[in-house]
Image (cartoon, grey):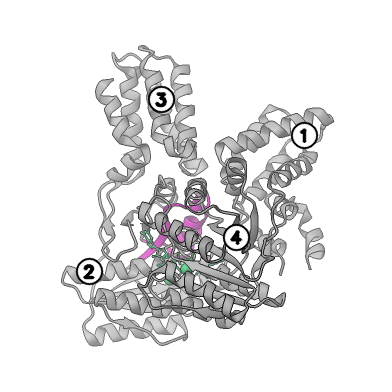
């Protein structure tokens, strides 16, 4: 199936390009059409793919490339570079507060992985010698609080909950509790919500106002399709998110959503979820992700023998 | 509230839905030419229809336009809907005639399996069926407690063991309980699993074998739950789950957002699997049987039709 051989498609496109020796504009154009299709099949947002290809094309049809001895190799290199740039530079850390505790608010669509990732981050911080506090602000979903409690006890991290109360009030009191008990990180789990749900989106805005967080992390499932852009845009417009957690990267999704989310919000992907266990959390590396999206193993080999 | 009004509510707030952009695009054309097809193909891809299937839909549309001598871009709507509805129609009914029948619900993590089971139990309960829920997600934190809440809400009975026990053995117990208590339907929850994980997929095959062995003459449904926001990955999901546990139908959830879910077209094209239900919210009555015509209409709704559908849907 097309989706699985994204890197094969790219390789094929680049191979054809290579076999041509000297390139003219229409060779590049044809190759870029194939790159664009390959990106689309990996769920990269339509507009993001279009802009990306335009950028690469612009650089690729310059004299420097056309007249070089190995034009195909240069085109491939440009694709690689532009993609890495699009993914952002190096890794990014959590923001530090002027005075403790740091407050991290998790938000996102239903089922994206918020609760699991709040607990994963708690474990990571605890292992670094911090004293995190998990806060149960999903007061709607059946057994959401129990889920956080089970995960909290697995991580050995305390969970602050007040049953099905008002999430705004709960988060405010959790921060107070953290100050009293010397917790230097407060990690707030919230209910999943659609970006078009005005009441629930407003609840997030009010939590932000009440606390206020040092980080607002949008949790995005790597399998999300073209919708990822609308989701990211809406959450970002309302909340001014500080970063993204990309989850379920242990699947075979090419993670096109990652490119799109980064491109529309300009906010870095801070963490990547790579499994259901609490230890399955990584600090995000843009270069590795770029390789993953492009199936860069193959592409880099191509550059080498070009 | 029907699917239509739910989706329309979403539409009002998003300018970027496929439906809105197709509408704007068609309005901007005065005649049907090649660039209309090209733009349409792009918009279909934006709706997660997939590159190949989008191409096929446009091919069919070109043929129909030519065959019927259609000239007005506005008439493209009806053709498009007909093509899409025809692609998706058929096989929507659940086959649960025997007593008991068994429904196994599977899918990747977080798509809405447990919630769908709760809603389905309520739906079948309202049709007078006695339903038993099997808590065979023994892995995820508080998965059993979550299903327990849904059992209460839907008035179904719950069969459970403790977290960490063997899921196949919970399925075994559930079928035994159904026979003993003369239940009509057993619905088994399973843990979310990514389709590329061999051992977890093997576990599903094992569960299937238990059902086959314990209820050989029972009607069986294996429902794959897909999140409507999923992109092309849904096709790989369907393919892998299909080979582990012969799927009989799809449930498409979270359609109360924007009318996405275009990927079910690719799945129907490539694997021939019917959509049986759609999820349109988190409440107990937010499950609807799939209606191909309505779905096609929601995917390609004319903007000026909003009022008209208000009434037809009430
Ligand atoms: N394979 C895999 N599964 C994950 C990952 N992160 C979370 N999950 C699973 O995804 C499902 C949903 O995770 P949750 O943490 O409950 O998601 P949520 O966003 O809190 O969901 P709601 O509260 O219902 O909106 C669970 O089955 C998790 O075990 C990941 O990185 N990889
Ligand atoms: N908006 C909306 N949310 C839904 C729908 N169906 C399920 N959800 C939500 O999606 C989230 C995940 O649902 P679950 O039923 O726990 O999903 P699951 O597939 O059982 O998840 P795991 O068991 O962790 O793999 C919950 O927050 C549900 O309330 C739907 O049709 N619309
Ligand atoms: Mg949660
Ligand atoms: Mg579940």
Same chain shared by disc 4 and disc 2: no
Q: Chain of mark 3?
A: A
Question: Which residue is denoted by mark 4 in the rendering?
Answer: B221
Residue A45 placement, left or right of A267: right
- Residue A233 colored magenta? yes
Does mark 2 fall on the same chain as mark 1?
no
The residue indicated by pointer 2 is A125
Check the picture and name the quadrant holding the N terminus of chain B: bottom right
Q: CA distance from mark 2 to mark 3?
A: 44 Å
Q: Could you confirm whether marks 4 and 3 are on the same chain?
A: no
Callouts 1 and 2 close, C-beta under 8 Å: no
Image location (x, y in percent) of residue A3: 47, 39
Rendered position, A182 above or below B287? below
Q: Is residue A12 above or below residue A43?
A: above
SS type, badge 2: helix
Number of residues whose C-alpha sits closer than 10 Å to that of mark 2, classed few (under 14), some (14–19) or many (20 or more): some
Q: Residue at x 39, y 14 (%)?
A: A23
User: What span is colored magenta in the figure?
Assistant: A216-242
Q: Earlier in the sequence, mark 2 or mark 3?
A: 3
**Measured Cα–Cα span from mark 1 to mark 4:** 48 Å
In which chain is the residue bearing label 4? B
**Residue sitting nearer the eye, A133 or B163:** B163
Give residue A12's mark.
3
Which is in the foreground here, disc 4 or disc 3? 4
């Amino acid at each position: 199936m097309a989706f699985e051989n994204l890197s094969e498609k790219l390789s094929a496109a680049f191979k054809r390009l290579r076999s041509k020796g000297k390139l003219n504009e229409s060779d590049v154009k044809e190759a870029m059409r194939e790159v664009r299709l390959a990106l689309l099949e990996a769920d990269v947002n339509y507009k993001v793919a279009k802009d990306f290809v335009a950028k690469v094309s612009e650089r690729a049809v310059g004299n420097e490339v056309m007249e070089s001895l190995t034009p195909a190799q240069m085109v491939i290199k440009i694709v690689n570079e532009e993609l890495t740039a699009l993914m952002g530079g190096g890794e990014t850390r959590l923001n530090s507060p002027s005075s403790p505790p740091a407050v991290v608010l998790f938000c996102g669509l239903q089922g994206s992985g918020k609760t699991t990732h709040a607990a994963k981050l708690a474990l990571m911080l605890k292992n670094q010698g911090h004293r995190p506090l998990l806060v149960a602000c999903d007061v709607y979903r059946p057994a959401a609080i129990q889920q956080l409690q089970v995960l909290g006890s697995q991580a050995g991290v305390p969970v602050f909950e007040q049953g099905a109360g008002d999430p705004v009030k709960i988060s405010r009191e959790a921060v107070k509790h953290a100050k009293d008990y010397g917790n230097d990180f407060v990690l707030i789990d919230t209910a999943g919500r659609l970006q078009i749900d005005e009441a629930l989106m407003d609840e997030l805005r009010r939590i932000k106002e009440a606390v206020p967080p040092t980080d607002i992390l949008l949790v995005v499932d790597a399998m999300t399709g073209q919708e990822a852009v609308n989701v990211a845009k809406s959450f970002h417009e309302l909340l001014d998110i500080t970063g993204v957690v990309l989850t379920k990267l242990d699947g075979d999704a090419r993670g096109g959503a990652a490119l799109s989310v980064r491109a529309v919000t300009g906010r870095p992907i801070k963490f990547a979820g790579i499994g259901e266990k609490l230890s399955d959390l990584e600090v995000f590396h843009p270069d590795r992700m770029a390789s993953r999206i492009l199936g860069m193993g193959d592409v880099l080999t191509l550059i080498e023998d070009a | 509230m029907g699917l239509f009004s739910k989706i329309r509510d979403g539409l009002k707030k998003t300018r970027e839905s496929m439906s809105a952009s197709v509408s704007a695009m068609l309005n901007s054309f005065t005649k049907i030419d090649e660039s209309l097809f090209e733009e349409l193909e792009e918009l279909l891809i934006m709706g997660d229809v997939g590159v190949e299937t989008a191409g096929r839909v446009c091919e069919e549309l070109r043929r129909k336009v030519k065959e019927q001598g259609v000239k007005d871009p506005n008439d493209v709507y009806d053709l498009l809907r007909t093509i899409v509805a025809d692609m998706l129609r058929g096989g929507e009914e659940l086959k649960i005639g025997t007593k008991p029948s068994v429904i196994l619900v599977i899918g990747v993590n977080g798509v809405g399996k447990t919630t769908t089971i709760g809603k389905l139990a309520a739906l079948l309960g309202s049709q007078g069926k006695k339903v038993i829920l099997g808590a065979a997600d023994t892995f995820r934190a508080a998965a059993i407690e979550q299903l327990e809440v849904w059992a209460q809400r839907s008035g179904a009975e719950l069969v459970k063991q403790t977290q960490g026990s063997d899921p196949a053995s919970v399925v075994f117990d559930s079928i035994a309980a159904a026979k003993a208590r003369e239940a009509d339907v057993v619905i088994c929850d399973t843990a979310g699993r990514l389709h590329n994980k061999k051992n977890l997929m093997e576990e599903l095959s094992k569960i299937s074998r238990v059902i086959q062995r314990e209820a050989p003459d029972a009607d069986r449904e294996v429902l794959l739950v897909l999140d409507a926001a999923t992109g092309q990955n849904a096709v790989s999901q369907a393919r892998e789950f299909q080979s582990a546990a012969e799927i009989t139908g799809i449930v498409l959830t979270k359609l109360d957002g924007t009318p996405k879910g275009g990927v079910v077209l690719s799945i129907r094209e490539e694997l021939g699997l019917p959509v049986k239900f759609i999820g349109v919210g988190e409440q107990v009555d937010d499950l609807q049987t799939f209606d191909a015509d309505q779905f096609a209409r929601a995917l390609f709704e004319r903007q000026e039709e909003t009022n008209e559908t208000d009434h037809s849907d009430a």
